[in-house]
């Protein structure tokens, strides 16, 4: 499933044999994700999984201002 708009998209990805997924090009471009960048993966059994850039995550939880 692929659906893209200017500020959001829905894209399906498959989990590989090592548990890895590929972040779609649309997401990497929209969120300026570069090779080697650190991402945070958060999970909640009821709400699902979220992926954030590490710098954004630390800003949200009260990191350096």
Image: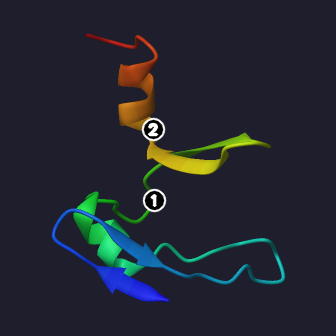
Q: Position of residue 24 (x, y in %)?
A: 43, 78
Q: Position of residue 28 (x, y in %)?
A: 34, 68
- For the C terminus, the quadrant is top left
Residue, disc 1: 36
Question: From this viewpoint, which residue is outermost toward the bottom?
Answer: 1
Q: Under tag 1, what secondary structure?
A: loop
Q: Under tag 2, what secondary structure?
A: helix
The residue lying toward the viewer, choosing from 7 and 64, is: 7
| Quarter of the view holding residue 55 | top left
Q: Position of residue 21 (x, y in %)?
A: 63, 74
Q: CA distance from mark 2 to mark 1?
A: 12 Å
Front label number (2 vs 1): 2
Picture disc at residue 54: 2
| Quarter of the view holding residue 27 | bottom left
In this rendering, the answer to whether 56 lies above or below 39 is above
User: Seen in the image, is 47 located left or right of residue 53?
Assistant: right
Picture disc at residue 28: none
């Amino acid at each position: 499933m692929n659906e893209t708009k200017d500020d959001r998209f829905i894209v399906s990805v498959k989990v590989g044999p090592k548990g890895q997924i590929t972040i779609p090009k649309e997401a990497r471009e929209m969120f300026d994700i570069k090779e080697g960048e650190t991402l945070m993966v958060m999970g909640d059994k009821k709400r699902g999984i979220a992926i954030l850039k590490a710098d954004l995550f630390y800003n949200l939880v009260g990191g350096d201002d």
